[in-house]
Amino acid sequence: MSGRFPVLLSLLAAAILSGACGPAAEVGPEGEAAVQAAPISGMYEVSGLTVATQTGDKRDIAGKIVLAEDGDTYTAKFHLTTLFPVGPETLPAEVIGSGTGSIAGRTLEGTAATQLVIAMIPGVDPAFAYVPRTVTKRLVSTSVGTIAADGSMTIEIENQPAEGEEYVPTRTTLRGHRVSAAGLGDVD
């Protein structure tokens, strides 16, 4: 029995160490380890910059995007925050919406319906209860994004006013990473 104990201990240690390193990588035809890519579906934390295409004015933007992959298509919901220029002031605003598109490899292309929820009191979160706010500025957004194998995301978004709306067209660039495998109902 004493001769078997070191062997069992070695096997146990090897099992623990291999589990701590994550799933074993498969070896490709040229001997390199193939990395298993993170799924596309999930929740992503993103941040970036929105630039008005006519004036060059910039504003920070950040939040969450939730993607659900279904074969070669996807659906998305997003909830982002920014400061939106309203006259001489910038007011806190939420950028909310949903979209759909196609997937080719790890590249996503699609369109989204987007709205702005703007707090009418400077410095106050538009989601705070009883804060006067306005839901306005319907936008049509087109996007091209890439999800890397490690779960990082880059996305370029062109924002145009929906029919009948006034909005200075913008381009938004976001970068982020997958934070969970949450479903579409989990974006807040």
Image (tube, helix red, strand yellow):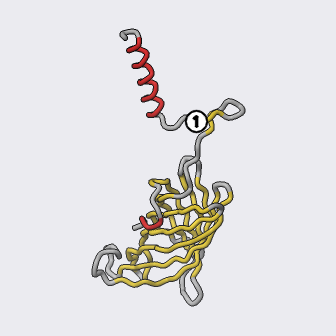
Q: Quadrant of residue 168?
A: bottom right
Left or right? Give the position of 28 relative to 12: right
- Residue behind mark 1: 25
Residue drawn at x 53%, y 58% as measured from the top left: 41
Crowd tier of the residue under label 1, counting other residues whose Cα lies within 10 Å: few below 14, some 14–19, many 20 or above? few
Q: Residue furthest bottom?
A: 164
Percent x, y of residue 35: 59, 40
The residue closer to the viewer here, 33 or 54, is 33
Say above or below: 45 vs 129: above
Q: Quadrant of residue 82?
A: bottom left
Percent x, y of residue 93: 41, 75
Q: Residue furthest front?
A: 1
Judging from the image, what secondary structure is the residue with disc 1 in?
loop
Residue drawn at x 55%, y 79% as measured from the top left: 139
Q: Residue furthest right?
A: 29
Kind of residue at disc 1: Ala
